[in-house]
């Protein structure tokens, strides 16, 4: 069942809506052909579910009205002329209530899923989600041979902010850093909090020069943001542009982390950037430090 739901989630919304409408038509024909002695009322919940879950609440409401109307028209014999209108009203209310219950349930599940994937303080992805997405990017590189860049960022002197201004100021700083990075990165770029004041950025399909320009822009904006807020911090970056896939996600992270540490020990507030062209290859690494 879980695999079926996952498969249906990947289908275009227009296709799911069309399937739901066709199901209502089919059920109406069956209901009309069998007459009132055999009711298929419960099966009308299937297209309502499909529309609500995979398309949206609005589609679910429309399909609810269509289901109620179809079922009402299929029942041809009534003792009173007012009965079909009353039945139609009750059916619409029933299906719409089911639609809202399903919509609320899905919203709750999506919210829990999102919370499980994000850092509760900053809204960035958490380490677990980052590991999964980074592994997918490495797999994609092995297939398509397109470069990507991994960036390890650490907030210089973060402890000083906590000690002198309080933990609330430190939390606000981390939130500010994530907002700034989001504003200056692409929607396809991944930002994750992997430690107390440590972050990873994953830049898909990004070569050395493009990554250098992008991260330097992020660094400048970060410095401007902390200066504006009178926060005594800077930022150190370790960057690796991969032209060959790393052995694993841990290997990728370690390479970027080591470069970040190299920048911190050489004076902080730096970008240290290397190209990785595979283990055991000569001239595989190019080093650049920018202050």
Image (spheres, helix red, strand yellow):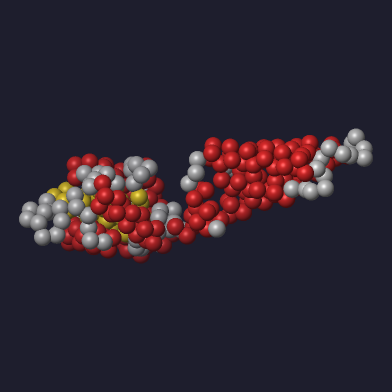
Please provide percent x and percent y for residue 66: 70, 37
In the image, 254 versus 85, the foreground residue is 85
Q: How many marks?
A: 0
Does residue 264 appear anywhere in the picture? no
Please provide percent x and percent y for residue 128: 39, 61
In the image, 32 versus 277, the foreground residue is 32
Does residue 26 appear anywhere in the picture? yes
Rendered residue at 53%/53% (across/down):
5
Which quadrant is the N terminus positioned in? bottom right
Q: Residue furthest front?
A: 33
Q: Residue furthest top?
A: 81
In the image, 150 versus 178, the foreground residue is 150
Please provide percent x and percent y for residue 235: 26, 53
Q: Left or right? Give the position of 239 relative to 85.
A: left
Rendered residue at 89%/36% (across/down):
82
Q: Residue furthest right?
A: 79
Please provide percent x and percent y for residue 43: 70, 49
Rendered residue at 58%/54% (across/down):
108
Rendered residue at 62%/41% (across/down):
20
Q: Left or right? Give the position of 88 relative to 17.
A: right
In the image, 215 versus 10, the foreground residue is 10
Q: Is residue 89 above or below residue 237?
A: above
């Amino acid at each position: 069942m879980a695999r079926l739901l996952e498969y249906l989630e990947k289908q275009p919304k227009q296709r799911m809506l069309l399937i739901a409408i066709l199901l209502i038509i089919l059920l109406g024909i069956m209901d009309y052909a069998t007459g009132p002695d055999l009711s298929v009322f419960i099966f009308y919940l299937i297209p309502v579910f499909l529309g609500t879950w995979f398309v949206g609440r609005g589609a679910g409401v429309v399909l609810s009205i269509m289901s109620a109307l179809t079922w009402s028209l299929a029942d041809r014999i009534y003792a009173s002329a007012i009965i079909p209108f009353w039945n139609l009203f009750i059916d619409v209310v029933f299906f719409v209530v089911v639609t809202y219950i399903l919509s609320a349930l899905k919203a709750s599940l999506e919210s829990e899923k999102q919370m499980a994937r994000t850092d509760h303080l900053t809204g960035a992805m958490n380490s677990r989600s980052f590991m999964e997405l980074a592994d997918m990017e490495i797999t994609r590189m092995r297939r398509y041979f397109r470069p990507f860049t991994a960036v390890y960022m650490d907030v210089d002197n973060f402890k000083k902010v906590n000690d002198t201004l309080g933990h609330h100021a430190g939390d606000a700083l981390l939130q500010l850093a994530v907002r700034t990075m989001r504003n200056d990165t692409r929607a396809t770029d991944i930002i994750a909090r992997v430690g107390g004041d440590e972050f990873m950025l994953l830049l898909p399909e990004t070569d050395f020069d493009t990554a250098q320009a992008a991260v330097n822009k992020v660094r400048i904006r970060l410095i401007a943001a902390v200066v504006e807020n009178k926060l005594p911090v800077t930022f150190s970056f370790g960057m690796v542009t991969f032209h060959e896939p790393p052995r694993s996600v841990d290997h990728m992270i370690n390479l970027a982390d080591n470069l970040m540490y190299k920048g911190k020990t050489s004076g902080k507030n730096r970008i240290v950037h290397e190209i990785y062209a595979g283990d055991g290859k000569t001239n595989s690494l190019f080093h650049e430090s920018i202050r």
